[in-house]
Amino acid sequence: MELNDKITLSLPCKAEYVSVARLTAAGVAYRMGFDIDTVEDIKVAVSEVCSRLINVSGKNNGGYEILYEVYGSKLIITFSSDIERAGCIFEDDEDGLGVSIIKAFMDEVEFCPDSRERILSMTKYIEEKS
Amino acid sequence: MSGELIVKAEYSEKDAEIFVSGEIDIYNAQQFKEKIYRIVENSTGDVSIDCSGLNYMDSTGLGVFVGALKKARQNERNIHIINIKDHIKKLFVITGLDKLFIIH
């Protein structure tokens, strides 16, 4: 499948910027043709990862990047960071709500694609209209 | 700003009704928690949370709802969630929390 466009967002690990990641996700997904309900799901999944990254970053702050890859019928969203505790960020998530939500809302999720910088990658396919 | 969180409460004889509007995420979840907990503590009856103006929430908001329910249950009271939008109700369903709350 051909990669059409790449959008990269670089954010500090600060709670006030999670809405920026969410709005960017919504803008890209809506432009690709996802329906409104699916756009909402993608926004929540993105927000869950950002929130977790901010929690594990602690007071050291640092930053992270979100890469939105637009293919013909799928959107791949990849998170990377150089913060000290990056890696399997959901490994010791106490309530597990974030993981449940991400798994339910996205079609494919790789929780620890790399051991270092690439933290999480998730894919959503556009459902073909019958 | 449409995303700004607004929490208002109205008290009847025993019960409390909370009106939530805007968005809840990691940025304002603590603020939401403090307001909701205070209202639950001040109420002697059940608490209804009207979510008709709530446009967005993620697991940080869900966590606050669960904490508030625990507080209410300690005093044998309940939390009712009313007028919640479908895409937010979905969060309660997929996490199984819809079985704990009374969702109207």
Image (cartoon, coloured by chain):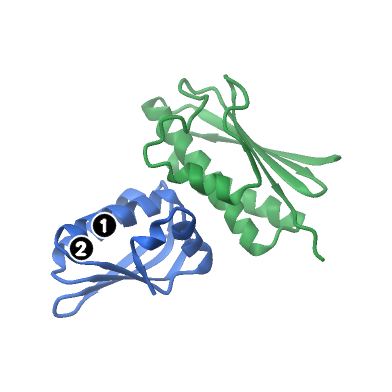
Quick check: A14 left or right of A8?
A: left
- Disc with the residue nearer the chain's start (1 vs 2): 2
Residue at image location 62% in from the left, 27% down from the top: A113
Up-down relation of residue B42 to residue A57 (above or below)? below
Q: Position of residue B2 (x, y in %)?
A: 48, 64
Disc 1 packing (10 Å; few <14; some 14–19; many ≥20): many
* Number of numbered labels in the structure image: 2
Q: Give the colour chain B carries in the figure.
A: blue
Residue drawn at 47 percent across, 44 percent down: A98
**x then y, percent, for residue A69:** 73, 40
User: Which color is chain A depicted in?
Assistant: green
Residue B84: image quadrant is bottom left
Checking the image for residue B68, the label placed there is: 1
Type of amino acid under label 1: Ala
Q: Are marks 1 and 2 on the same chain?
A: yes
Label 1: which secondary element = helix
